[in-house]
């Protein structure tokens, strides 16, 4: 059996991610084979082996919560193996035996044949070594209430470690949305392939450490995945070896348009990020009338007016939006940037202008050069003309819709940032932490992506690598106790530069 154990948020690049409907298609294809493998038995054994490790040799009993569907069937298999390994196991079953599928019914019968009993409630005053959550799996679509909500609350309040089977009960597997209430697991063992709900929105707060078991299946050979994980390997893919015989012109020139009155710092942050992530030259086109002539902390930046930057004929890419504002001047300069035949990154107020002005949105849709958008959920909602809560209810679908409707690459920022491309492929980032919830982080991301574009990375690679680098830099700082509390956007820049140089070592 193939098994991959993965720390939270750390997955190999391009590990497939499947929606529920896709997992069902894979399961149905396997079931249609002349001699289909016993997937429930494999899943139960894989989870039981992990449960045995987690429960340890404490002598304390194990509680298994078995729900009314196939997730409950997995739970019966887990319980049977643990009992055979001499664990004291209590099983609480919340379903009706006559309504179980054939596989789940057989699993219940095998549990009883092994001498196991089925309880209707959690025994009182027990000190559990482990609780196995097998209440609900990937098919849950309704809010949890009543008896199941009480069981989840009791498990969460028990103080015992919890192992969730496939997904924590109450977590919607496609979205990461909590349906009323959800298990707060320390470990989640998931089967066949990763699910987006484990990786985005509330998923990372409920899954703990994720263990992927393929159950001996080659899922991509059965059904190629549209979704994937963005892992650290993407950073190296975005870079090219640097010859000794080079000059600054070999590494591109970035133009940044923004910096309205009172928001010049946003444009400077983007410029500093672009410079320190390897762009040969960075021009910051400021629209404020009282804009500074020099960035005293980064004098290598060339500060110009927005007009002057847009007239340069040697730019490699543009970024528009950091501190741009929403004035008529801001709209004018965004229109000018859209007409440039250069890769373009749009962030912040640039996105708000796209959302609010139909002519700008149409110009964006018609661009030939690739455009990359970096909205947070509220900006995404404006682009889609919906509420922020609607975006967050299904982050993958929202990102895909923006990419398709606006013909752009997009990253929907947040916990488990979702990147989507016009070809409808999508990916979820695996780096980052709560310290990134601070002002200026988006401006730094814009500069990082622009730097990678300037140095020759294609748009999709630059987007994915930039998003991952941004989060990985924040993770590196947090590991050194610089954050998460009080982590400043400007601090991320140097950390990202360090990671890029580490990745570059193997290219030499």
Image (cartoon, grey):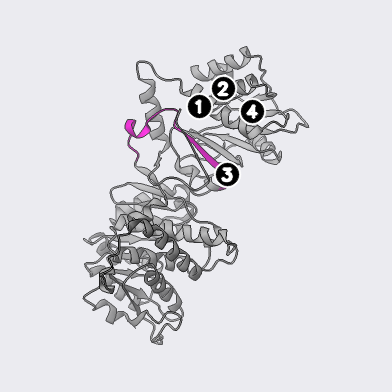
- Residue 38 in magenta? no
Determine the residue positioned at 37% across, 70% down.
274
Question: Which residue matches tag 1?
Answer: 43
Q: Position of residue 19 (x, y in %)?
A: 41, 38
Of 325 and 72, which appears nearest the observer?
72
Q: Which residues are magenta?
A: 205-225
Mark 3 touches mark 2? (CB < 8 Å)? no
In this rendering, the answer to whether 56 lies above or below 111 is below
Q: Choose the circle earlier in sequence order: 4 or 3.
A: 4
Question: Which residue matches tag 3?
Answer: 206
The quarter holding residue 271 reads: bottom left
Question: Which residue matches tag 2?
Answer: 77
Determine the residue positioned at 35% across, 60% down.
373
Q: Choose the circle earlier in sequence order: 4 or 1.
A: 1
Question: Which residue matches tag 4?
Answer: 64
Q: Position of residue 179 (x, y in %)?
A: 55, 41
Mark 4 touches mark 3? (CB < 8 Å)? no
Considering the numbered disc 3 on the image, is that residue within a helix, a strand or a loop?
helix
Mark 1 touches mark 2? (CB < 8 Å)? yes
Q: Position of residue 281 (x, y in %)?
A: 31, 75
Q: Choose the circle earlier in sequence order: 4 or 2.
A: 4
């Amino acid at each position: 059996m193939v098994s991959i154990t993965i720390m939270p948020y750390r997955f190999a690049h391009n590990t497939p991610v499947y929606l529920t409907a896709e997992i069902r298609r894979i399961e149905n294809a396997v079931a249609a084979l002349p001699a289909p493998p016993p997937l429930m038995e494999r899943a139960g054994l894989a989870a039981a082996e992990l449960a045995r490790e987690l429960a340890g040799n404490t002598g304390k009993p194990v509680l298994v919560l078995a729900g009314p569907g196939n997730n409950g069937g997995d739970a019966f298999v887990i319980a049977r193996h643990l009992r055979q390994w001499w664990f004291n196991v209590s099983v609480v079953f919340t379903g009706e035996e006559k309504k179980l599928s054939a596989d789940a019914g057989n699993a219940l019968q095998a549990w009883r044949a092994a001498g196991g009993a089925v309880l209707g409630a959690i025994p009182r005053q027990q000190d559990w070594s482990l609780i196995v959550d097998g209440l609900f799996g990937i098919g849950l679509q309704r809010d949890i209430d009543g008896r199941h909500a009480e069981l989840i609350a009791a498990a969460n309040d028990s103080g015992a470690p919890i192992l969730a089977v496939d997904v924590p009960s109450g977590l919607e597997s496609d979205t990461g949305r909590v349906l009323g209430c959800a298990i707060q697991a320390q470990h989640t063992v998931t089967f066949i392939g990763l699910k987006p709900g484990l990786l985005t929105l509330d998923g990372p707060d409920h899954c703990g450490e994720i263990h992927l078991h393929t159950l001996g299946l080659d899922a991509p050979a059965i059904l190629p995945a549209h979704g994937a994980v963005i892992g650290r390997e993407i950073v190296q893919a975005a870079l090219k070896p640097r010859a000794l015989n080079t000059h600054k012109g070999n590494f591109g020139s970035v133009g940044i348009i923004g910096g309205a009155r009172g928001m010049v710092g946003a444009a400077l942050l983007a410029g500093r990020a672009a410079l320190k992530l390897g762009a040969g030259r960075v021009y910051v086109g400021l629209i404020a009338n009282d804009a500074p002539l020099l960035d005293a902390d980064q004098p290598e930046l060339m500060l110009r007016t927005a007009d002057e930057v847009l007239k340069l004929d040697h730019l490699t890419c543009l970024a528009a939006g950091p501190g741009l504002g929403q004035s008529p001047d801001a709209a004018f300069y965004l229109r000018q940037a859209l007409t440039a035949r250069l890769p373009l990154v749009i962030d912040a107020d640039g996105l708000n202008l796209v959302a609010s002005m139909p002519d700008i949105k149409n110009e964006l849709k018609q661009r030939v050069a690739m455009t990359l958008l970096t909205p947070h959920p509220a900006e995404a909602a404006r682009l889609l003309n919906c509420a922020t809560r609607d975006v967050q209810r299904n982050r993958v679908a929202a990102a895909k819709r923006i990419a398709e409707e606006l013909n752009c690459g997009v990253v929907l920022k947040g916990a488990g940032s979702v990147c989507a491309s016009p070809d409808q492929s999508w990916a979820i980032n695996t780096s980052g932490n709560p310290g990134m919830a601070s002002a200026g982080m988006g401006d730094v991301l814009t500069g990082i992506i622009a730097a990678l574009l300037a140095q020759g990375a294609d748009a999709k690679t630059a987007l994915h690598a930039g998003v991952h680098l941004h989060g990985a830099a924040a993770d590196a700082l947090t590991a050194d106790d610089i954050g998460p509390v009080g982590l400043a956007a400007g601090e991320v820049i140097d950390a990202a530069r360090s990671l890029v140089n580490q990745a570059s070592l193997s290219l030499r």
